[in-house]
Image (spheres, rainbow, N blue to C red):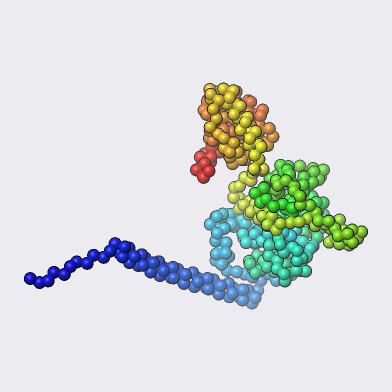
Amino acid sequence: MGLKLPSVEVPHATTIAVALLASLATASSIFAVQHYSKQSRIRRIKDEISRSHSFSKLDEPSHSAPVARGGKKPAPVLAEHLIREQLARNYAFLGEEGVAKVRSAFVIVVGLGGVGSHAAHMLLRSGVQRLRLIDFDQVSLSSLNRHAVATQADVGTSKSGCLERHFNEIAPHVQIDARNELFNIDAAEELLSGNPDYVLDCIDNLNTKMDLIKYCKDHKIRIISSMGAGAKADSSRIQIADISETFEDPLARATRRGLKLKGVESGVPVVYSTEKPGSVKLLPLEEDKVHEAEEYSALPDFRVRILPVLGTLPALFGNCLASYVITELAEWPTEPLAIKLREKTYARLHRDLVNREKDGHRGSGGSLALNTSDVGYIFEEIWRGRSALSGTFDKLQLVRWDTSQPATFQNVVCLTRAEAEKHEKIPANKLSEHYSAEFIEFVESRFLEERRLNKWR
């Protein structure tokens, strides 16, 4: 008989270790190939961009390279596929038609400080290919805490020229019309010429701001305005609303009142903050400069004292402006909330709804499955803080839509007090006799939206 060798079993842990090492080796190889491919692609794109810029210096100006004001050198002709690569994420988000509308737009930004520089910067990066940038001021060392692109090397140069230089490095194919000029009503016709698709008001001087808004309203130019970003710190309080719906913001209040005297009461979207004015105030003028204050002002009638600014807030204001304009140009639907974080309002709406249920509303037995947080969600996210029927913001209530069914996320509608009283007298099966088919369809569409959104709550 031959010798029988004992069988050797490989421990289970060793088998797992071998498998893991093999997997890691495979994964490493895949990542290495991907990294090499990515780096090779980046090098090819950089080389192509470099060649494109070199060729553009030799080429004659063409119809695709518009000549800027004052005989400036036309924008370089960059290959279309490179522009599309740069805007790839925007194409994925807004679609072909949306980005095409953004790229064909002409936008003017007036005021290029903390707010305006960030707004213009993101308009550029988002594909707007014609930008006019207007500001009379220079970059200072103290403005570097909030400016979008300025560096220490830019200190002492014009804000418009600073943006133009940096923008040409970011998107050299974009036509930049930089105007180192002061906006005033006498220069409005020239500075706002060319049929702009949008004007962004980023001015911090009240009278000039009102003149710009009034001019745009009179000439049917779409405009969005920035209110006060100075002395603010709470980014969660930034809002977009019509000027008539603003509150808590001192600059918004002054602008609203001034525009009303000029005959403009609404129709001007603004970015503002509901943060209550705190202890941060204008810095006092140094004692030895009080009697010569006018000499320290950049321009006559411009304030000399400085309002402290936390640089993040102007940046957020500017990005809000740019985002609003981009989505408007692309016709991407958004419905900004006029006001949010209104805890007292939510508590009052909840209390009123509870009282309606306690009154034995349609056999409810006085129970309500919705808490204050739920009511705030329904009020803001579903009904945008306004009456579903009239669109007004005054004296609002939450009531059941179908009065025979319980009050739930998909059966509560926002109406004014007068509208709610009439609505509660309508039998559940008679809604179509009292409301138009369009309104009923609108309400049902909001309930359908709620079903989609509720899973994310």
Q: Residue 94: which quarter of the image? A: bottom right
- Locate residue 284 relative to residue 93 in the image: left or right: right
Residue shown at the point (86%, 56%) measured from the top left: 301
**Which residue appears at 63% of the width and 36% of the height?**
346
Query: Which quadrant: the N terminus?
Result: bottom left
| Residue ID at (68%, 68%) | 166
- Is residue 428 in view from this perspective? no
Closer to the camera in the image, 366 or 45? 366
Location of residue 206 in the rendering, given as x and y in whole percent from the top left corner: 80, 51
Q: How many marks?
A: 0
Q: Residue furthest left?
A: 1
Residue 342: x percent and y percent?
66, 40
Q: Residue 105, can we see it?
A: yes
Q: Tell whether 294 sits left or right of 311.
A: right
Kindly indicate the quadrant of the structure image that contains residue 432.
top right
Establish if 132 lies above or below 244: below
What residue do we see at 53% from left, 32% from top? 369
In the image: residue 177, left or right of residue 290: left
